[in-house]
Image (cartoon, grey):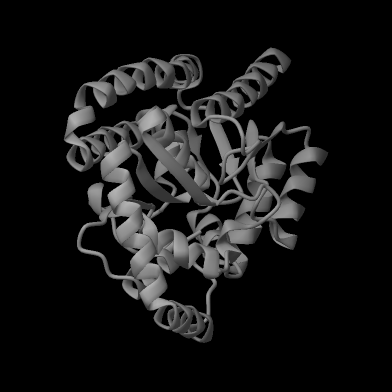
Amino acid sequence: MKRSKISSKQISILIGLVVVAGLVIGMIRISHNQTSTQNGTIQIVAAENFWGSLVSQLGGSKVKVTSIVSDPNADPHEYEVNSTDARDFATANYVILNGAGYDSWGNKLLAASPNSKRTVLDVATLLGKQNGDNPHFWYSPNYVNKVVAQMEQSLISINPSDKAYFQQQDKILTVSLSGYQQRIAEIKKEFTGTKVATTEDIFAYLASAAGLDLVSPPAFTQAVADGNDPPTDSVVQFQQQLQSGQVKVLVYNEQTVTPLTSSMKVIAAEQNIPIVGVTETIQPPNTTFQVWMNSELLNLQNALNAQALGQ
C-alpha cells in the first residue's frame, strides 16, 4: 500500500486543468473561505475515508468532509485522481493525507493549487514516519489516538470560536473509540503469543497491539503491499507455515488480491485455518471508523476462540 498509481502525464493534465481554470478556482476558493468564516463550516478533504470518518465525528455540524478514497470494490493502491479531486483540494480549508507514500497523489494536487491559508495534516509526518515505513497507521490504536488529538487541535486553530464545541465532540469520540480499543485489550489478554499470519502488512500494527505473534514472512507481506512479486523463498516459507499447523488464523486483505494471496487463502482453507477478512477502507463506506474496526476485531476474536475450542 505504499504505491500510488498515477502517471506523470495524468498529473500534468490535472495541473493544466487547474491552471486553465485558475481564475475560476481562485474565485471559488476565496468565496469558499469567506463562507466558512461567516457560517463556521470548515471544508475538509480527507484522502481516505478512515481519516474522513474520524474528523467528521470530531467536527460534527461545524465541518463538511469529503473523503476521496472510499470505494469498497477498488484497490486503494490503484487510485487515480480526477478533476473533481483537484477542485476539492483547491477549495479545502483543511486537508488530511495519510502520507508515507500511501497517497502521494494528494501532495501533487496540493502543489497544483497552493494556498497559504489551507491547513494540511500529513499523518506520517505527525507520527515520525517516512516513505518505506508501513503506512497502515489507522490499524494502530495508539496512532489513531494521536491523530485524533491533532485533528482536534487543527479544528480549534482553524475556528477558535468553536473550541468548546470541538472539545465536547472529542470527548464523545474518545468514549466511542474506547469500545474497539477495549476489544483489542481483550484479545491481548486471552491470546497473547498466538501465532497468526497475514497476506499483507496491513495487519502488522494491529497484531502488535493485540499481542499476537505475526509469523508470516515480512518479505512476502511487504512485497504484496508494494505491488511486487514476493521472493520465492518467502512464498515457500509462508506455504510451509500454513501447512505445519502452527498458524491459528489467516488475516486476508480483501482489497489487495493477487494470485499468490489467493493461493495462501486456499491453503489455509484446506488446513481448516479460519480466514478473517480485513479491508483498507471503511466497509461499508457509510458506517463509522470504530464500528468498522470493531466488526473486524469481533471476527478475529471469534476465529481465535473457535481455534482455542477446537484444540
The residue at the point 32 percent across, 32 percent down is: 142
Residue 219 at x, y percent in the picture: 50, 60
Q: Which image quarter holds the C terminus?
A: top right
Q: Residue 260 vs residue 213: left or right?
A: right
> Which x, y percent locates residue 76?
57, 57
At x 65%, y 19%, the residue is: 302
**x then y, percent, for residue 27:** 35, 66
Residue 111 place in picture, x, y as percent: 32, 72
Residue 102, above or below 194: below
| Residue that appears at 68% across and 40% down | 244
Q: Nearer the viewer, residue 105 or 134?
A: 105
Q: Is residue 205 visible?
A: no
**Residue that extends furthest to the right in the rendered view of this protein:** 270
Nearer to us in this view, 164 or 150: 164
In the figure, 298 relative to 152: above or below? above
Q: Residue at x 54, y 71 (%)?
A: 5
Dividing the picture into quadrants, the one containing residue 47 is bottom left
